[in-house]
Image (cartoon, grey):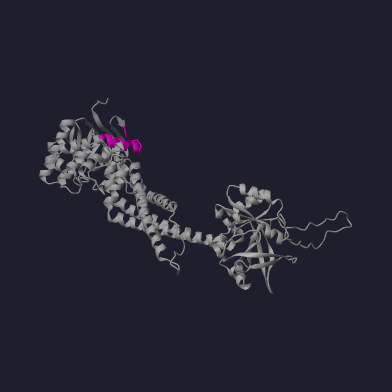
Amino acid sequence: MFKPWLPFEWIVAIRFLREGRLQTVFILVGVAIGVGVIVFMSALLAGLQGNFIARVLSAQSHIQLLPSKEVTRTLHATTPKEVDAAIVQPPLQRLKSMDQWQSVLSTVRRMPDVVVASPVVGGSALAVRGSASRAISLTGVESDDYFLIVKLPDKMVRGASRLTGQDILIGMELASDLGLDVGDKLRVANAAGVATTLTVSGVFDLGNKGANQRSTFVALRTAQSVLDLLGGVTSIEVTVRDVYAAEVIAQRIQAVTGLEADSWIKTGAQFFAALSAQTTANTAIRFFVGLSVAFGIASVLVVSVVQKSREIGILRAMGISRGQVLRVFLLQGGLLGWGGAVLGCVVGAVGLVLWQHLALNADGTPLFPLVLDPVLFAMALGLATVTGLAAAYAPALRAARLNPVEAIHG
Amino acid sequence: MDKPDVVVRLQGVRKAFNVGTGIETEVLHGIDLTLHRGDFCAVMGPSGSGKSTLLNIIGLLDRPTSGLLQMAGEETTQLADQALTRLRGHHIGFVFQYHHLISAFTALENVMMPMLGAAGFPNREMQERAEALLESVGLTPWKNNMANNMSGGQQQRVALARALAMNPALLLADEPTGNLDTKSADAVFALLRRINQEQGTTVLLVTHNPALGAQCDKTIQVVDGLIQT
């Protein structure tokens, strides 16, 4: 018997679908496969990209603020006898401190999208031990903030990520080249040849041989004194909440501070282009799967309208309006889309869980972490329902416009 | 000069098909007809004479090409589809030759359908009325049978109960017994007669069967698109 809370159109739509049995089951399975593929692929891609980005961005900041470059200022001719210089040589970019960096830092930290902003002193130096020496890039950081940007504590192989005044953290390659281990002394000389002796407090692995050879980290003050930049910093490293918005935020920071702000999107343009290409490919696949789902639903409903044309005629004869008939068939489309999507979400989720358990690294850990994002499932449900409604529109219109006389007498 | 008990009035109703094309054919050539409350009238005539077309026009399923048609005091030829649908729902009940129940529903649900369509939501009163109607056609034991799961005579009685659901002033029956065995046909005809007498419902019955025609109060002969009296 009828549920008192179900309106007429819903009652008829549900009954028609139920009566369709095999037809309904087949199209539901079809929609489910489509939605399942979309859910599975989207989650896979989101996991993959998230993993990529996490790997790339765990070793660098999202935005780097640099002092603006020095430019040559030419003197213009002031009298007719003088001429402008024909050749203007670009200036040397000396290592110099950022102007007013404290106020810039507090401005940037106050911006709503910024998570962490950390001052950094960076420059070249020479690591000397006995008769061996290596060129290194010395990075002076405030460990509390900076380690939130570059997760150095997670990358330590030996020792601790402690950075007091006399400590230095070095990469694995440098350690083996210079025969260093935790607790050993290392002399670090600047370009002018002034050397400071530091103690190795830890050895890290950044996952890249070049980086492990060159990168070293010391406390901010230590770097300032080694590089002869007392009280100064050479850059401010920033992380933001939404990594994809980094470029927009960088431009905003640039506008506010007047400094040069480079986002990871700009500096890693190729990497980002690869991500975009993946996203575009996924969108295209989603679009075409969605399209085939829509046509599937539409074709089933077209057949159903033909099958039911006599009953539609009877309904019209007993005073059911065109609008009601239209809604009955629109609802069938929407219900097929929604029902198929519910099944599809289950299929997609099962697929993802299986993937987690079957696609493993050599050590038995999952290839990369997958997140079953409720938003993705909600979107899939919503879109499939809308697709079903849209697909049903043409058949529903046809049903509503049936001439009752012809429909009844066939 | 309408008497208040006029149910439907046709004046000079013509109907042509394929208007404006080379094969335009006029089926009805100017029909004048008035049905009063309580009439029990048979429409007879040879196949192709235009009986069904006339019935469809009276039932507001089809529009006349010209002429006037008054239903429930309203001139209908200029009304929009929505208004016609409403008039149809509230004033006219249909019974067709091939019973035409909605197969996805039970007998009881089929009878509820016109009330449900008009009200939008199901309620207790609808169900009670539908049950009473099914009882009056003697089908209470079969009320929860699916529509297809009944004999032809039973289905036609369900269709009759459904046609009465909105308590229409006019009941249009297009060969309601044409597809039934004699016993079922008699039962359905007796029901029509009883409804007519008990509730004063006007019945217009298309039939080929002269025996049935003879039992009606009035007979209209349609020959070649004209009423012959």
Magenta-colored span: B75-91
* Above or below: residue A77 compared with residue A402: below
In the rendered image, the quadrant that contains the N terminus of chain B is top left
Instruction: Please say whether residue B85 is one of the residues in the magenta stretch.
Output: yes
* Residue drawn where x is 20% and y is 49% of the image: B148
Residue sitting at the far right: A81
Give the dominant element type of the magenta stretch: helix, strand or loop. Answer: helix
Image coordinates for residue A278, horizontal then vertical, percent = 50, 61
In the image, taking residue B151 as reference, residue A221 lies left or right, namely right
* Residue drawn where x is 25% and y is 32% of the image: B8
Image coordinates for residue A31, horizontal then vertical, percent = 36, 56
* Above or below: residue B29 compared with residue A310: above
Image coordinates for residue A78, horizontal then vertical, percent = 86, 54
Residue sitting at the far left: B183
In the image, taking residue A236 as reference, residue B150 lies left or right, namely left
In the image, taking residue A317 as reference, residue A337 lies left or right, namely right
Question: Is residue B29 in sight in this rendering?
Answer: no
Image coordinates for residue B33, horizontal then vertical, percent = 24, 33
